[in-house]
Image: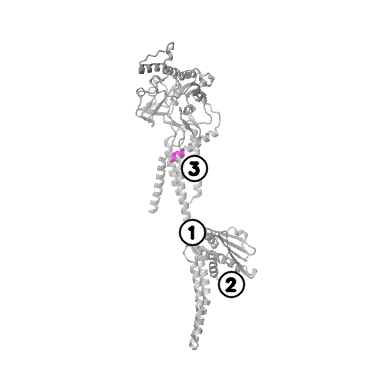
Amino acid sequence: MKIILKNIGVIGLSLLLHLYFYQSEHIKKFDYKFYDLTMMFENEINKHEDTFYTVIVDIDEKSLHELGQWPWPRVIDAQLINIINKMNPSGIGVNILFPEEDRVSPIYIQNFYQKFFNKTIKFREFPEVLKDNDKLLWNSIYKSNATIATYLINSTYTRTHCEDISYKNNIFAEVKTTLTSTSFLCNHESIQHEIENFGFINAWRDSDGIFRRVPLFMSYKEQVFPSFALATLLSFDSNREINKEHDTVLVKFTTNKPKVFSALDILGGKVSPSEIQGKIVIVGSSVVGLDAKYTIANGEQISKNMIHAFTIDNILANSFLTQPEVYKKVNLLFSFLLSLLMIVLFSKKRYIYIVGLFSVMIIMSFIWLFNSYLNGIYISIGYLWIPFVYFFAAVLIYHIRVINQEKQQQENLLIRQSKLASMGEMISLIAHQWRQPLSVINGIVLNIDVDQRKKILHANRLDEHLNKIEETTEYLSKTINDFTDFFSKNKGKETFYISDVLNQAEHLTGISNHRDIEIIYLNSEEIEFVGYKSELIQSVLIVLNNAIHACLKNLSTIEQGKILIDVEIVKEHLLISIEDNGGGIDMKDLKKIFDPYFTTKAKQQGTGLGLYILKLIIEDSMNGRVTLHNGKEGAVFTFKIPMNI
């Protein structure tokens, strides 16, 4: 039952995590980056000169410096459109809003003075056709079949003449769009009336501040209107098939850009008609303060004119991208299912399968990504990878923690097993060491009894017998203490002298029973240490037992076994070196001597755990290092342990 509840909990947690990501801005921003990288990679591998259908006529700083600040008298705007129209472009889009009357128009000046000062101003010898700049501009727009700009906003006010505007008999009535507005900003009535070609110039950045997408359709009062770029295209190509399933598209911005001509050069006749002929002309301004700048994925800033130009070129080349919402849901579902599969594989420790699955996911998802990209669809790959990577990281961290706990438990078990394996040997040693003292005590007791019977047990003789018994029992007590220290479960640090550790380890080996082997201490300095005494005793004991075994094995060759022990402090580290003259270790065995269950002894003599336990104690428990090499006559073990464990 607990396992079932645990599995339900894990599945529920994974599901909640994925649902959270679906609504999170975090995943959107990562997904934007995936798209940016894909687009830049595609631009990098497809470097070629692009053929653009659009050109831009820019009311730039040079034009304003020569012809005066903005807004210009609309007679100049009208003249600019007329000159462009005579160059036979395919279409003209005027990316400028004219919401008010032209206040430098002669007819406006006449009306102003008549209204406020009751003065009639007459312009003698002034052509009638030049009196109304707005009419001149309207006439240029109408005759050139140009497209004008509108703006859809969310406010509470719309001018009366804008409320009833509809686009070419509402030809987009069947389009379903989620983009709506409550207000419609159009041009002044004298310019807007009877103009069929118009579109909204709305554009906005994504939540990370980067511009990627443009709206194609927006609605106002249940009527659907096209974007400025789309309306400009339809002004001369009304039969073009437009995908009406998506109200926004992702624009592909290439390294190359449409040509840009200064409005002043157009008015001055410095641009060849061949540069304009057959092109779609976007008229607007890139001057700071007149037009906002938008940052695209490569960090470059572009004007809204350039955005409209790229949008038109994308539509004509069918190179724009759509981002269907369904792919976000599909990717999120894949991520959820793969996360559950990863949990199963981790629980069964199928690490090769995990690496394989990861590799297949990377290859297949990016093949799917680029194939869809080339077919005009961005599949929102971030919704697959971001939740999966986060969940995978969480599971991996948890799994590593569990593995470490299992490893620690296994190491502790091995240490206990090693101590238990040593227990039988030491019980035999203790029994052997106790036989003679017990015999001595028994002999003293018999002597006391004999002296008592002979009536010669005077005080001095009794004290002599009792002193011998006390010395012997003290020896027995020391043996018990050494045994108790070794098997102590207390893992706490304590302060002790290294000499005590060496003496207890020596005593536990029972080396006194081997008269052909002696231990030689090269340094008699008393070194105080703070650490785990019992474990350090065990470490020294393991090496001493191995050294004794090696010496006994080669006693016929060496005649006298020697074990040299050196202790010193070097650079805040305790160094304990134990060297024997037992012949050393074969070179082929040196690399695996610390592996668990590897032993050079006969099966009945060794378990293969001793040196493995030694390495665990010194390196894992004491944060030190144990090394082994062959000296002149035998093996040399060195412990290097920090003084501050």
Name the one closer to the observer, 324 or 307.
307
Nearest the viewer among 527 and 384 is 527
Residue 432: x and y in percent read: 53, 74
The residue shown at (49%, 47%) is 354
Q: Position of residue 197 (x, y in %)?
A: 42, 22
Q: Quadrant of residue 339?
A: top left
As drawn, the residue found furthest toward the top would be 125
N-terminal of the pair, mark 3 or mark 2, is 3
- Tell me the distance, in whole angstroms, between the alpha carbons under discs 1 and 3: 35 Å
In the image, what residue occupies the spot 38% across and 54% down?
2
Q: Amino acid at mark 3?
A: Met
Q: Check disc 1 and report the residue beneath it.
A: 410
Q: First in sequence, mark 1 or 3: give its number.
A: 3
- Numbered badge on residue 526: none
Q: Is residue 392 above or below residue 262?
A: below
Between the residue at mark 3 and the residue at mark 2, the CA separation in whole angstroms equals 66 Å
